[in-house]
Amino acid sequence: MNRTNLTALFQPSSIAVIGASSDKLKPGGRTFRYLAERFGGKLFAVNARGVESERDGVYVSVASLPYAPDLAVIAVPASAVVGEVEACSKKGVKVVVVYTSGFGELGEAGRREQERLAEIAASSGMRILGPNCMGAFNLHMHSYTTFTSTLGHAEWPKAGNIGIASQSGAVASHLLSMVRDAGFGVSCWVATGNEADIDIADCIAYLADDPQTSVIAGYLEGCRDGARLIEALERARVRRKPVIVMKVGRSMEGAAAAASHTGALAGSDEIYQTVFERHGVCRANSYEEFLDLVVACSRGGFPKGRNLGIASISGGAGVMIADYAGEAGLRVPALTESTQARFKEAVPIAGVRNPVDITAKVVTSPELLGLFLDGLLAEVHIDCAVLYLSNMGRNAPLFTRMREAIRSLPARHAGKLIAVVATLPQQARQQLEEDGYLLYEDPLRAVRTLAHLAQIASSFDAPERRPMAASAHRFACQPSGNEWAALQALRAAGIPVVESCLVTSAQDAAAAASRLNGPVALKIASADIAHKSEIGGVMLGVRSPAAAATAFDQLMERVRGAAPAARIDGVLVAPMVAGGVEVILGTKRDPVFGPVVMFGIGGIFVEIFQDVTFRVAPIDNEEAGRMIREIKSFPILAGARGRQAVDLDALASALSTLSHVAAANIDRIDSIEINPFIALPVGGVAVDGLIVAA
Amino acid sequence: MNRTNLTALFQPSSIAVIGASSDKLKPGGRTFRYLAERFGGKLFAVNARGVESERDGVYVSVASLPYAPDLAVIAVPASAVVGEVEACSKKGVKVVVVYTSGFGELGEAGRREQERLAEIAASSGMRILGPNCMGAFNLHMHSYTTFTSTLGHAEWPKAGNIGIASQSGAVASHLLSMVRDAGFGVSCWVATGNEADIDIADCIAYLADDPQTSVIAGYLEGCRDGARLIEALERARVRRKPVIVMKVGRSMEGAAAAASHTGALAGSDEIYQTVFERHGVCRANSYEEFLDLVVACSRGGFPKGRNLGIASISGGAGVMIADYAGEAGLRVPALTESTQARFKEAVPIAGVRNPVDITAKVVTSPELLGLFLDGLLAEVHIDCAVLYLSNMGRNAPLFTRMREAIRSLPARHAGKLIAVVATLPQQARQQLEEDGYLLYEDPLRAVRTLAHLAQIASSFDAPERRPMAASAHRFACQPSGNEWAALQALRAAGIPVVESCLVTSAQDAAAAASRLNGPVALKIASADIAHKSEIGGVMLGVRSPAAAATAFDQLMERVRGAAPAARIDGVLVAPMVAGGVEVILGTKRDPVFGPVVMFGIGGIFVEIFQDVTFRVAPIDNEEAGRMIREIKSFPILAGARGRQAVDLDALASALSTLSHVAAANIDRIDSIEINPFIALPVGGVAVDGLIVAA
């Protein structure tokens, strides 16, 4: 199979519109109008009943076209779609765009039809966008194979460097409107719909390579293939192209709505979040945040660090901006003494430390703006700045003098991003943007954007993150619901496990306790009992062989009472592990990303504070160390409040090994939970384990 | 002393402008122009050098005015301010507004001058707004005693029902612009500046009583008198007037900036937050959120509950909105089967559960909007709705048909708030607003606003919350750094405390252990050692009298090594308390709100997760019970995962008692920390305590 890439979708030299219509309210009619007016390549209309066209001919069928166009749009009723797609693949069309709905989103029959489309794509190599999609276009090529109404009214968007890839046509249209209204330009735009073939990962990968795109805006509800999404995101990152995404399904209500909307296994949102963070993706939570990030990235400047200078005409607003900075992870360091002294000399009542309060004296002496902002930016430890003007610039003559005072500063301090917060008329905003300022009406949006840009810039500098391969041989492991067998399997795979033995009589229990020579724990071993302590199936700190024998009998009696039907393998006798910190190591299979490894602090607090972290498996020791350090409870492991620190290297090694076990046995093992693993000052041991079969 | 209220500030029948000028850029000139053009009462100009006026006379001094005006504006240099204020108080002026800066914000000399102003106010009963303030106005009275430039340009604001009270003139002006630009009306506006006399609490209290104000928008950086702020907020709440505040100083950076800006003790932000929550105040985190809340409240409708219906032209947007709802605490319940069936009949490919996806069929059949939205709102369990139209209404003929389809619904479903999310031209927005819809461009802002409104509505229904009085006699308590003495003092005040005795020899330690008849804990008793366990000053689970004697000697030796200079009172011997859950009970003095009581889960997790909650003390048992239930770790106390629940009543009683101790001894005690208090299945006991003197 030789699958073509998406070049023909975004850079077609010839297009056929199948279902071209003269009714401009219909998708096929609207598309044909857009293309007829603007597309510079060959344009064929296909309609069995004929249609008017001033372009390159009208044909009754795909088969009758003079040659295979690069791209064909299919805007015909659902019942005719498969036939037209087959005709296109026979003709040798490279990519088809299927607008028609009534497929996967409409139950079993629709799903089967959609699978046929996928099969045609797979067998022929022809790529298919859709079905149930709003199409795609490239503003540099004028290839408008879309029926979005956003192009039809208001001003036509500018060609620019923002690429938009979305699973939803409505969201993609909304983003397009916002970007256009803000005066910024778009390169390529695509709405993938049901994704029978081409998916959001394909589109992001294309945009990562497209020389006319320098920022990628993505909207997704989920994706089928996590590995390909990761590859696409990483492709963009190493090319230093920021990827801004909105992804829904964060809350329970959202996840429920997404499941009902797409009918697909969405994968766990927290794993997406992990992937986004690791590959430098900036996740926007709203259209506004999305727009702010996309247009700021479109301008191409990024702060070199997290130190923010704040200049304001109001002390109160300065405090507000400092608050936002603190919450967004920016710092507001004091200015140097000499700069403070210079500011104090110019305006004795000014606040000069940072935030700088120039005071309302700006009204009578607008040149003060230049003096203060220049001084602030000249500080070597300041990476970016916010200048708060409120509505002061609404007075036109005053605005002219203010602008004059600060006009040269972005050029003089190139490399330091400056955001101006002001409620200004449109023309004044544009003038400041031309001078090189970022413009905002709300200080929160200004600060949040600068903080995200600093984060993006630092993510560009990380080394390339290629997926690791797991050695199936070395980490082979069999699932087992029996705790003892699970621990032995984990030991065999390389994870340190507490010494323990499985006994089936009181005498053997006493003998085992005697051999272990110290206090022991006894635990029922049964694949049928998940939460042993809740039925009294665990006894800790048993201090003698005789007590161990008694404990054995008690345990068996308790279990007979609480779970008479459970199959009992015996009782596990293990030494009590003194000291250390209980942690949880786990793995699961994500429907999108495959094997995933989890780390968290142990005990009841895991459930309450959800202080856990995830990675797509497998990971090396270094990455495992980063996971361990990113939970909030890390100070407990590092030795807070006079406690002894645990052996972080041993812990990281166990976590990394476990991640390899998960990856190497993805076909057999659904999940592994080691709870607890006791992290000790030297080393650490798994004390309880569960391996669930796939 | 007979202090006049603020009626003369907001409803003056006569005004004098001291420092009236014909230069309209100067504060005195701008104010005089505003008043001369619009104020209907008597207006006097006061200027020693004369000034032109077409109004009610020009005078060389306050003394020479024909009678005392209700309100005088002082716009003269700092050196002349005190003289003019004194002249006003002699003349019998009711309120003066001092614009002039150079007082408390400018170091020691300025602070002394400001104190003189406060003394004049206190001794004469004349109220003073400012100094260093932007003044006040009432749009219904046209009493523009302000120099904000926001009134000077663009359209004059409408008179309306939004009251704005701010400590910052710049922020107040920004809010005013935003409210005006959004097309809403303002009643009173005031910027309090340095607050030598009139403060933000006075202004909120005035607005709570003002019949023309129905929503109060406040901005504060801090306040002097927490009790009066609480009284003002509660006054507004019982009158069912929403109070929306922005308060800065939330983050470390913000608090540092605030301290440097105002030079005042700001009080702890978390206590403000507690007060806001308790008194129904809605805290906005940005200008945008502020505007959204204020204008929505200005319209006067509130959802009766938290169930949101979502109707959208796009499945993806529906999922996004459901996500926002989940995160904001709204529910998205399924529609009834019969409604779902009706929707499915109208549009077979529609999503019908909730979110409802009407699909893009709206383009060809706009009447579907009415059918779906009407059906959604007719569901009795739906309290409010979001209708997502994206940019569909930009096509004017389509918009007209869409509007027609839904025009009657707000009236038909009165009592159910409906937010429309759409990017529409200004005129179309206004039309939908006139029809009774709330309008938003961003779905996050729509959902967040509805969630806040539901919260405000439920807070209106809570009973009046009057401050409790503490009985000083009953809860008298002496501070003590000595743990044993502290525990005895707490027991005397009514808090259950572990039986323990202070011993000074190994023999006495053995005797105490023998008397207690069970495992004991030994702890160094010394006011000089704060964290005893960090120097090995605590030994737990000592099992015999002989072991207790040995432990005594070991403890003394350890302390001699680790803290040779510490004064040692002896060693505390106490029984080991078995079982239960460790919690922390504490109190502190807040510089603004006075005595404050704190509750949190014990152990190292308090520090890491900051799972604590606060109240202004004292509180009754019921309120203490609410505190206990609002920490995240509450399930641990309530008996999560098969644990035994603790005695919540006994815990609440101890917490309430402690709050009374803090309130009754606010002059002597700075803070109390009971750490741990062990909450037991029956009862509970304080095990360690510290009482720090004021």
Image (cartoon, coloured by chain):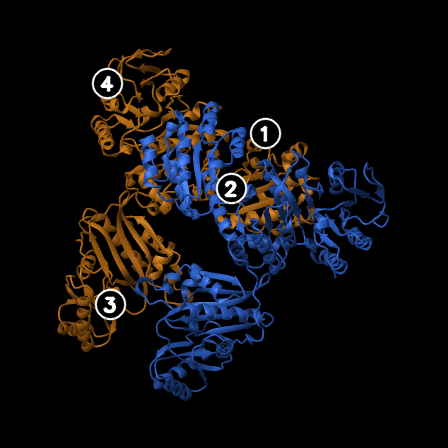
Chain colours: A orange, B blue
Callout 4 environment at 10 Å: few (<14), some (14 to 19), or many (20+)?
some
Residues at discs 4 and 2 both on one chain: yes
Q: Which comes sooner in the sequence, label 4 or label 2?
A: 4
Q: Which amino acid type is shown beneath numbered disc 2?
A: Arg
Q: Looking at the image, tell me whether mark 3 or mark 2 is earlier in sequence order.
A: 2
Q: Of helix, strand and loop, which one carries label 3? A: loop
Tags 4 and 1 on a common chain = yes
- Label 2 lies in what chain? A
Q: Answer yes or no: do the residues labelled 4 and 3 have beta carbons within 8 Å?
A: no
Pick the residue in front: A640 or B484. B484
Q: Is residue A75 left or right of residue A524?
A: right
Q: What whole-number distance in Å separates the C-alpha atoms at marks 4 and 1?
A: 52 Å
Is residue B242 visible from the viewing direction of this image? yes
Would you name the residue on which mark 2 appears? A445
Residue A91, numbered circle? 4
Please identify the quadrant where the N terminus of chain A is shown.
Answer: top left
- Label 4 or label 1, whichever comes before in sequence order: 4
Mark 1, secondary structure of its residue = helix
Answer above or below: position of B12 versus A540. above
Question: How far from the left and from the top, in percent, is residue A251?
Answer: 37, 46
Where B322 sits versus B369, above or below? Answer: below
x then y, percent, for residue A412: 57, 37
